[in-house]
Image (cartoon, rainbow, N blue to C red):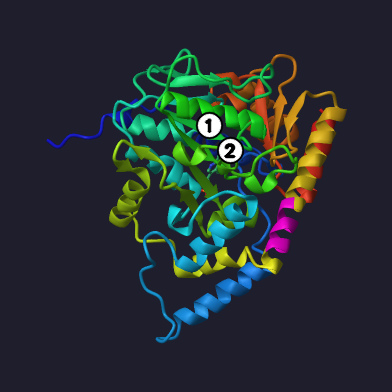
Amino acid sequence: MFKINDNYQKLPGSYLFSTIAKKVAAFTEANPDKAVIRLGIGDVTQPLTAPVISALHAAVDEMADGATFHGYAPDLGYAFLRETIAENDFRSRGCDIGADEIFVSDGAKCDSGNIQELFAADSRIAVCDPVYPVYVDSNVMAGRAGTYDAATGYWSNVIYMPCTEANGFVADLPKERPDIIYLCFPNNPTGAAITKTQLQMWVDYARKEGCVIIYDAAYEAYISEDNVPHSIYECEGARECAIEIRSFSKNAGFTGVRLGYTVVPKDLMCGEASLRDMWARRHGTKYNGAPYIIQRAGAACYTEEGRASIMGLVEYYMENAKTIYDGLKKMGYTVYGGVNSPYIWLKTIDGMSSWDFFDYLLERANVVGTPGSGFGPNGEGFFRLTAFGTHENSKAALERIAKL
Ligand SMILES: Cc1ncc(COP(=O)(O)O)c(C=O)c1O
């Protein structure tokens, strides 16, 4: 008999959002007359912007003509997009990143799940708690996490870095030395941002201890405060210790068309081994490139018109964030996030558990959010609402919650 990768058997239950979807489906089936407002999953609601749609149409027309048709894309991404990204997302901010250090992909989820392949099987990872589940689960699948303790919700071989009210949801340096550190700022789920001084401390630590930082900046576009870095490469020495992951999902609304990229600088070395070359090798072997039409749409996000349109999307969602944040605060809730991030992280009331609060909101207000405990034990007692709904839904959800 063949054997399976037993590590998959270790994964507890189903993915957080599948559990939520099942609960919501059961509720709507039992209550067909109730209109549920979904502020749970971080999916966007606004259509792609006009410059992106024009670029898509033009690229589709190119595909219809033998003279301009495109087959397989270069596995690392088209030069027109990689150059544009290097210039606009990095060099314009003073970050020394070249086009040949940018790897275009079909999204940040794949990259943040796949990047662990570059590291030794016995590497120790450190994650924030609570955390975007992909970092831990992908390391579980690779056999790095040890054993799961259902009572505590922790894996034996993972170093957890608590993100709490006390530290402003920005983790302190770990007490034990990890090999790989996952950081995500602006943060999903807490909505917290990191200052440049704080991030520099992490870079200094990683260089001193010989760690690599996987920096997930999927929500970079939502940064509104000046002291918050847009890229880890704004920090001195980050080229030697950090990989950065970006997405077109949350800024440009590409969740349904799929585009992202990862930056692996040439200075990131392990002895003689270049991680940039390893990631290029991996892409060459396992990936055939994001579609031409989508990469054209991605490039359209960087034109003057494109930038303005995307800023409009971000402003739209941030207006929701303000509605939710201010509204909850007025009702007496303890609320975090929502300033440099489209996520609002609130404390449940009356000491309710995160899942009890989920049921309470679903049944009494017909509003869906995400239980904080689904992101890790330190998320217990918290709840995440997203600003990715429509203005109408965000306002209606708040009105319903106010009536509870
Ligand atoms: C922190 C973080 N990283 C990555 C992703 C996935 O982004 P993408 O749509 O590019 O796969 C998400 C999506 O919710 C996220 O919250």
Whether 357 is drawn above or below 87: the answer is above
From where the camera sits, is residue 193 visible? no
Position in image of residue 167 (x %, y %) = 66, 19
Residue at horizontal 32 percent and vertical 32 percent from the top:
8
Q: Secondary structure at mark 1?
A: helix
Left or right of residue 392: residue 18: left
The dominant secondary structure in magenta is helix
Q: Looking at this rendering, what residue extends furthest in the right direction? A: 330
Residue at horizontal 65 percent and vertical 30 percent from the top:
197
Q: Nearer the viewer, residue 310 or 239?
A: 239
Which label's residue is closer to the chain start, 1 or 2?
1
Q: Secondary structure at mark 2?
A: loop
Within the displayed image, which quadrant is ligand 1 positioned in? top right
What type is the residue that disc 2 sits on?
A: Cys
Position in image of residue 257 (x %, y %) = 53, 60
Position in image of residue 163 (x %, y %) = 60, 22
From where the camera sits, is residue 231 visible? yes
Residue at horizontal 31 percent and vertical 56 percent from the top:
284
In the figure, residue 288 lies in which quadrant? bottom left
In the figure, residue 21 lies in which quadrant? top right
Magenta extent: 307-314
Q: Is residue 308 magenta?
A: yes
Position in image of residue 120 (x %, y %) = 29, 32
User: In the rendered image, which residue does mark 1 sit on?
Assistant: 203
Residue at horizontal 63 percent and vertical 55 percent from the top:
92
